[in-house]
Image (spheres, grey):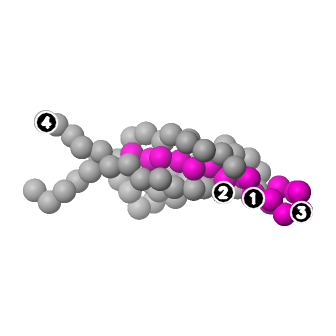
């Protein structure tokens, strides 16, 4: 049987690291999406205030099996 996967883009944040920001995005997605397959970090950036890092941000593409009405 053939499968179809949907890809969504999320932004996770953390005050500690980019890795924790990416994990936050995936963990949150797993609370409402089933059958997550792949997570790809596509961009990293930081939120700044007066030259100080406030938060690390990770843009993550997450794929999951698409389930339509059959």
Residue on which the image places disc 4: 1
Q: Do callouts 2 and 1 mark residues in contact (Cβ within 8 Å)?
A: yes
Name the residue furthest left.
70
Q: Nearer the viewer, mark 2 or mark 1?
A: 1
As for residue 47 lying within the magenta part, the answer is yes
Residue 24 visible, this angle: no
The mark that comes first in sequence, 4 or 3, is: 4
Rounded to the nearest angstrom, the CA distance separating label 4 from label 3 is 55 Å
Q: Nearer the viewer, mark 1 or mark 4?
A: 1
Q: Is mark 4 on a helix, strand or loop?
A: loop
Closest to the observer, 20 or 45: 45
Rounded to the nearest angstrom, the CA distance separating label 1 from label 4 is 44 Å
Q: What element carries label 1?
A: strand
Q: Please name the residue shown 69% across and 49% down the image.
A: 45
Residue 11 visible, this angle: yes
Residue on which the image places disc 2: 13
Residue 3 image position (x, y, % from top left): 21, 40
> Relative to 43, is 24 above or below?
below
**Magenta residues (range):** 46-63
The mark that comes first in sequence, 1 or 4, is: 4
> Relative to 2, is 31 above or below?
below
Residue on which the image places disc 3: 50
Residue on which the image places disc 1: 47
Rounded to the nearest angstrom, the CA distance separating label 4 from label 2 is 37 Å
């Amino acid at each position: 049987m053939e499968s179809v996967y949907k890809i969504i883009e999320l932004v996770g944040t953390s005050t500690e690291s980019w890795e924790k920001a990416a994990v936050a995005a995936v963990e949150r997605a797993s609370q409402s999406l089933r059958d997550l397959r792949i997570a790809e970090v596509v961009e990293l950036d930081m939120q700044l205030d007066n030259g100080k890092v406030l938060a690390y941000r990770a843009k993550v593409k997450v794929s999951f099996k698409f389930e339509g009405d059959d």
